[in-house]
Image: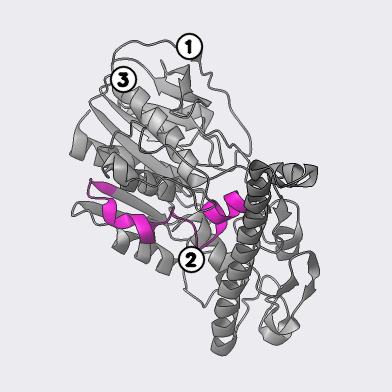
Amino acid sequence: MASAAGNTERVESRPTAGLRGASWDPSLVPDGLNTRVFPVPTADGAQIVGYLHARGGERNVVMIMHPRELLVTHYLVPHLVAAGYACWVQGPRTVGNDLRLEHEVALLDVAAGVSQLRALDFDKVVLLGNSGGAPLFAFYNQQALLEPAQRLRNTPGGRPVGLASAAMPAPDGFVFIAPHAGQGALLMNSIDPSVCDESDPFRIDPELDPFNEENGFRPRPASSSYPAAFVQRYRAAQHLRVEKIDALAKALLAERQAARARAKSGQGGREDVMQGAFNAIFQVWRTDADLRAFDLTLDPSSRRWGTVWGSDPVASNLGAVGFGRVCTPESWLSTWSGLSSNASFERCGASIEQPVLMLYYTGDNTVFPSDADAIHAAIAAADKTRLDIKGNHHGHVLDAGDALPQGIAGTAVTTWLQERFGR
């Protein structure tokens, strides 16, 4: 690996009680691991950050990135470094921020990270997408393999994006961990269609309420039992609600563009100037209501009752934190709309011809068995391997005494990398 500017920091191994989420176990951090912090400029002038975990001398590197999360201490980092691979964790420009996340722009962040790794002279660059990082990387690959002039010129909201002028090196392979089909596809299945008024989360249609016992809901720990006819109506209504929010987002953008046009022509007044500069922000309530999370007979698996946000559906469906809770028209259309977003395996999986390892956690209550089957089928690669591991979305055990799924995943990933790329 060639040298390059970056700050060096020794990562200390300290015991951590009750470690949750997707963070590493500090006791597994190998001796000699150092983290170098790189400021990385993107093609559109943004400044993002990359974290290179390595012991020195590695020839191949694995890049981890999520469009909305900073995964510096991802649980697979110690496994990768101990096995002889460098690990680059890319920081997105939109950490924890649904307001500004447009996946087409996020591709420039991915491109900057891959370009930096090519400049560091690694032999092979493998992209590891965990959860929402997986469809982001699938989207990146689709655009990277196109001729520059064929790449997308605008986001679904109409914002110009300079993919044609950006260096977008293609990766050598992919690892997908607990991948979902895309944030828009995910929300299409989990959005609560009982909402009658987007400005009033309490005005709902009881006949579509997923938490109405007359519709088949049963509180934890009992499994709900939704009739097939209700499930069919529910799915159709989810589609309709996303259509309505798409229409709202597009109307807000059209109003702004019309005001800008009037102001630019000289025929508008001060109000048009202000309206043309105004960027609407809206809330999307009740977005954690996939029926499969409460009715364990639908798409059956080893999952527990509840969602990735927990076992209190009232809190997760109506609380301040949730999928797509606060959006701009642009971020909704690019990221959370299952109708308008470009970042999905359905749209991008056919571009993936590099070797792929896909790990699916069988107790995942965000990605269900039929979702995993569809993702795997969408990937075009002839060399694709799928491994199912008993665990939840973050690789934690489902039952006491089980082997830690994160460790099983670490062994599977490093073995696969050695077989495909050596060290």
Quadrant containing the C terminus is: top left
Q: Is residue 310 left or right of residue 13?
A: right
Disc 1 marks which amino acid? Thr
Q: Considering only vertical position in the picture, is 83 above or below 269?
A: above
Q: Is residue 261 left or right of residue 40?
A: right
- Crowd band around label 3 with a 10 angstrom C-alpha radius: few (<14), some (14–19), many (20+): few
Q: Considering only vertical position in the picture, is 226 above or below 399?
A: below
- Crowd band around label 1 with a 10 angstrom C-alpha radius: few (<14), some (14–19), many (20+): some
Query: Which of the numbered marks, if any, corresponds to residue 414?
Result: none
The mark closer to the camera, 2 or 1, is 1
Judging depth in this view, the residue of 59 and 235 nearest the camera is: 235
The residue drawn where x is 36% and y is 33% is 165
Q: Is residue 94 left or right of residue 353?
A: right
The residue drawn where x is 39% and y is 47% is 152
Query: Which of the numbered marks, if any, corresponds to residue 8?
Result: 1
User: Separation of disc 2 and disc 1 at Cα?
Assistant: 43 Å
User: Separation of disc 3 and disc 2 at Cα?
Assistant: 44 Å
Q: Considering only vertical position in the picture, is 348 above or below 220?
A: above
Secondary structure type for disc 2: loop
Q: Earlier in the sequence, mark 2 or mark 1?
A: 1
The reply to whether residue 17 is visible in this rendering is: yes
Percent across and percent down for residue 315 are 75, 59
Percent across and percent down for residue 368 are 47, 65
Disc 3 marks which amino acid? Ala
Residue contact at pointers 3 and 2, CB within 8 angstroms? no
**Number of numbered discs present?**
3
State the extent of the magenta-drawn residues as a range.
329-356
